[in-house]
Every structure is written in structure tokens, then in C-alpha cells.
Amino acid sequence: MTFWLSNIIIKSSDKAASYAPIKVNQVGYPLIGGKYALVSGYYNELTVMPGTPFQVRNASNRSIAYSGELSLVSAYDASSGEKVLKADFSGLTAPGDYVLTVDGIAEPSAAFQIGDGSIYSTLLKDVQKFFYFQRANEDLLAEHAGIFARTGDRKEDHNLPFQSDPTTTKDVSGGWWDAGDLGKYVTVGATAISDLLWAYESFPGQFQDHSLNIPESGNGIPDLLDEIKVETDFILKMQDEATGGFYGYVIRDHAPNRYIMDGTASNRLIPTFHTGAAVGALAHAYIVMKDVPELAGYAETLKAAALRGWNYLEEHPEFIPQPSGPYDSTSDVNDRFYAAATLYRATGEQVYNDYVVAHYLEHSSIFEQETFSHNIGSLQRIGLYHYMMGEQPNAAVKTWFTDKFVQWRDILINANMNKSVWGNSTLDGFYWGANSNNAGIPVGLAIGSRILGLYNEQDLKVAADNLNYLLGINPLQMSYITGHGERRVTKTIHEVYNSDYLLEMPSGYMPGGPNNNGRYTFNAKAYNGSSIDWETNEQALNYNSPLTYLVALLTESNSAPGVSITSYEDGQAIHSNNPLIAWTFHDNDVTDVQAAYQVQATNNGWETVELDSGELTGASESYTLQGLADGNWSIRVRTKDNRGAWSEWAYRSLVIDTVAPTLNVVLDKETLWPANNRLVKVTAAVDTGNELSQVELLSITPSAAVDRYESMVQEAEFGTFDTEFKLLAQKAKGKEAQVYTITYRAIDRAGNVTEVSVTVTVPHDQSGNK
């Protein structure tokens, strides 16, 4: 008889480990944005305090390039058990290779770079090529895979039996292995496809043909789209020909126990939540691929499959589960919404609009989540993004979404600025796959912010802080991405790479990270880089997909040109219908110059563009918008460099106001009598229709000089809002009356001017004949 023992916990009285005190992003920091290290350790071991000097030194000769003092982040961080301080060197903008030292700490930090977006170029390639190395059933050749070349496994997928009837088979070959085992799951693949397509849509310049050295490189199609097609091909094969629904998954086991999982002969299961995820992903792939000439025909195939999948959902309004197994769910509500919203963007058809309008309020709670954006089974937020990009989304939904997103955005940014010790958006959440959400939260934030025109340095800070965490600014001083960083993950759990006898696995793999299952004292240190700890050291498709977007975002933000609007203050009121918009082009690469620009204006919150310069070639840094009506306007400018990269839009709000303010002036005395050569106080009642207008006493002019001016007009403070002054009651020489002309001027916030004059008369006599 054989007994197997599992889940044994061996406890030690030893204290939890503490790692090298200085934690840096071990790949490096972009020139634009914050740069910092965290310094941490147990309180009785780490002697440095706030105010302790630190130095950033050139790695080659240890000369000091920047110095500063530590500041306190947390006297006690419960997730690590450590005191945490910060060394901020954002002021260092010289590219180079560096280390950081701290007085009182013997060892310097790991080496790191400061540079433009190219410092992440290899990382961006590797986190994408992860998907090539996850290809299922396919031989990977040395010319593409190098030392990781292999013969494809589980080739029985070309003719795989159904669980419900093993005598019936279907070709479900291809696609990507889900994680470290060799199963294939539709909902996981669909989630990864979504993230990758958003990355391509957001930063197309980062994804080119010939960039990844995969078999399809050189076919005129961006390599990332070629790789996505590997998975969409598999999902198409998982569609049931008779019903249009999608089977849930291919089980991980070897033949003869490997099946297309569809239940039993008496209870065949084509799950609705897998189908919803597949419909949304295929519809999104159609949206992107239809505009790529080489993929236009294929895109129509994707669209047709998505529409058949939706028909299956309509014919089955009830929830249909998958056969018991990984990624199981008890609801399809989120997946149906994601499918409908994405199909609305893809087709513009009313049926999908109606579905969104009928169900959007069911998803209000997602905008209260402080530590989550989207993932498997939770793509409804992504569905709303698609809906907002549709042809004519419902006005009520747009208003609701805008308000909710702004609320959620504020929650995430506040958490990043005021709650996160280590920069990770999951805060104190360390659970199975948490690293996926540390990549995914800034992705969800960035997509929505870009749609609403809110994208700015705060979005970039959230993104940069999370990547800093993943690349080494964490309690373990660990880069969680294979192949990147001096102290890095070298092996994750993987059925292929744990048995290839190589020291490391392909670069670009990211495990789920710390996940305390009761075996660790401190949650943020609950990571075991072994080949048997599935709960912390397994990678998955939906981990690397948001990571790809995250790295592309930060690469783009530091390689694309920038533009700053220099004319007017934000919200400024001006009195011209033809404002001159001026800007400054800037680029980290001094060889790049402005090659084109575009200026747009709207007066309805970007629901429509009222004026558009179109793409104009040239290096001009100004443009006059002609004929803007009075009212509130939003202006935006973007520029393109000579390499073809566009900047993000820069925004400026203006109030156009060409109507002069009203101004009424009434004096308490219009006549001074008797003419006794005395000074008489005169009071003016001044009223303007615009309380924001500035009013000033401009001048008091007598018609005749009978004495020195200072004797005739006193206590008048010109250029101020002065309403009391004294005038000399003295006749003019001759028979003409003395007339004082008092002039006030009103200037509104737009610079419109109104001048009003009133008079005070000193008659010659009281005869009525002056």
C-alpha cells in the first residue's frame, strides 16, 4: 500500500528573511518621469534614517552624478515587516549606467540605466515573445527559438477526441499553452488577446514586422498581430459548428486522457461564459485586423464567428457552465456584456447597443474597486471602453461612464500617491496572480484615460511605479521578469522548461508573485522561486498580456515626441474668435525634429471635433483657429517627429468671450453749487453686469484749468476701483460752465473693455443760461 503526503507545513523559529536594503528598478528608469529607489530593512538592523545622504554614482568609475537625502515612506510596513525610506533622484536626467549608494550601507544597489524609451526595447520584445514560446503543438526551430528549440508536444490536438464522445474528434491544434501546464483555455486566451490588441491600438509604433524573429516575421504584418492570430486561429477551432458556441478548454493531460472538454453525452456543455469571452475577443480582433490589408479577409472570418457566437448566447439566455476544471465560473453576466459592447463597436448594430443600455447599471460597482481593473471573467470595464468608442453610444451611458470613470481614476491615483508603499497597485493584496493585476490596473487606467482625454503624467506615474515594483523595487529586491535584472527570477513552473536541463528559461516570463497561503510571516515576501510552487511561481497568458501593454506604454512615453502648449493658461478667457495656438516640440532624441502637426477644437467635450486642421506637414509651432464662437472650448495639439511617431495630445481649455461688459455709473452730484472755490466730495455708484470684471477710475478731466490740477481734483486714485473723490467748485473763466468728465473703465476676464463717462458741472450762474 502506498501513502502520499501533501500540504505539509514545516515551521521554523528563524525570522523571515530580509534582503539587500537598496531596491532599484534593475532594468532602469526613463529620462521622463520620477526616478527613485526604496531602502528598507528590519528596524533593529537598518540604521539609516530620514536625512541620511545617498549618492547615484556612475557604474564605471563610481564618480557621483547626483546626491540627496533619504525621506521616510513608512516607519513600519506590515506587508514586509520593514522600515522603508526613499531615495528620490528624479533630478538626474543624464543618460548612463549607475548604481546607488547610501551612507552606512556597505553594498551598492544593483546596476541600472537611465535613458530614453529604448532602455525597455529588449524587455518589450521579450514580454511579447513569451507568447511565441508558449505556442502549443508546434515545433520551435533554432532559428527562432535559439537554445530553447523544441519539438511540439501534445500533437494529438490535431485530431483530439471530445470528452462527451471519444469516437468523435476535431482539430483544435495551435494556440498558446495557458501557463506552466499544457492545457488550453478559451477564456484565458480571450483575455490575453484583449490586452494585446489594446496595446497595438494604443501604441502601434511599438509593434512592427520583423521585430520578434518569429516564423511569420517579414510577411508585412506586425509580428504582434501574427502572434495574436495564432490564438484566434485556435479559438476559431473551438467553435461548435452546429450551435456557434465555444467549447471551454482542452485539458492539460497527455493522451489517452486528453480531451476537448464538453461534458458528457447526456449533459453536453458549451459554456456561455467562455463563449462571451470568445465573442468579445474575436470582435476586437476584427476591429483591428480589418484595417491591415493582409488580414482584411481573415477579419471578416473573425466577425462572422463572433456573430454566430452571439446568436448562441441569445438562444441560451441561461447560464451554461463548463465541465469542472480550472477557470470555472458561476456567472456569465460580465462576459455577455463584454461581448455585446465590443460587437457594438465592431458593427454599430442597434441590438448590441440595446443590450448595453439595458445592462450597464449592473456594473456600477467596478468603479469603486481600488485594487482591480480587469481579468478573466471580469472584462465588463473593457466592454465599456469599446462601447465608448462605438459609432453613436447612448448619451446617458456616456455621461454615466464618464462620471464613474473619473471617480474610479481618482481612487486609483489616490491609492498610488497616498497608500502604496512599494508602488504596486494591489497595495497590501498578495494573492495568486497578484503580479498580473499590478500590470493590469495601470493598463485599465490608461485605456480609459486616453478615451476620455484625461491621460497625463498621473497615469504615467501609476504605470511607472508598478513596473518599478515588478523590476525590483519590492521587499524581495527581485525582478519578477526572467532575463531582466541582476537579481531576477530564473525559472518558473513550466512542464517544458523545468525539464530542459538549462539554467534559465526564455526571457520575458513573469510569475504570479507573492501569495501568502499561511506559510509566510510577511505577505509581500510570500514567494518561492521553485519548480513546485504553483501558487507563487507560475506564469500565465493573462499575466504577460497586460505586462506587454504596460511596457509599451512606458516605452512609447519616452520615445515618442512630446508637445507642450505655450499660449494661454488653462481655462483662460480671451476676447478673440481666432486664437493663435502655440506650442513647443520636444524629443529626447536630439536628432528628431517636428515633421507634422495637428490642431483640433471642440465645444462639446470631444463628442465631436468642431475644427480640425488635419495633418499638416512642417515644423511650424503655431496655428490660428479661425471662427470659434463664443463659449467654452477645448483645444488639443499633437506633433509627429521625422521617424513617424506621434506625440500624445496636449490639451488647453479656453473661454471665448468677445462681448464687452456692461458698465453703469451714476454720481450723487451732477452739479456743484455754490461755486465757492471749495472742494466737494463726489461719490459714484458703479455697477457692472459681470462680477468678474475689473473696474477702475480711469480719468477726471476738467473742461477748463482754473488752477493747478492737483488743486481742482483731489483724493482720486486712478487705476483703482475708487468711487469717492473731491472736485473744486470753481467757475470757469468767461461765461462757460466748468465741466468735469469722469471716466470709468471695465475689463472682463477675456480682456473686453467698456469705458463710460459721466459729468459734473459747475454752472456759471443759476440763471439757467449757465
Image: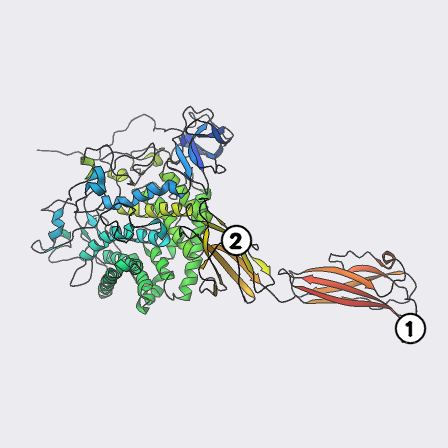
Query: In the image, is 533 to the left or to the right of 703?
Result: left
Q: Quadrant of residue 486?
A: top left
Query: In the image, is 364 to the left or to the right of 328?
Result: right
Q: Which mark is residue 766?
A: 1
Which residue position is annotated with label 2? 583
Q: Residue furthest left?
A: 167
Identify whether 478 is placed above or below 355.
above
Q: Which mark is residue 609?
A: none
Query: What residue do we see at 50% from left, 28% from top?
Result: 52
Q: Position of residue 23 (x, y in %)?
A: 40, 33
Q: Position of residue 700 (x, y in %)?
A: 80, 62
Graded by Cα atoms within 10 Å as few (under 14), some (14 to 19) or many (20 or more), the crowding at tag 2 reads some
Q: Residue furthest bottom?
A: 768
- State if disc 2 and disc 1 touch (CB < 8 Å): no
Residue type pointed to by label 1: Gln
For this rendering, which residue is in front, 606 or 6?
A: 606
Q: Position of residue 136 (x, y in %)?
A: 19, 47
Q: Quadrant of residue 532?
A: top left
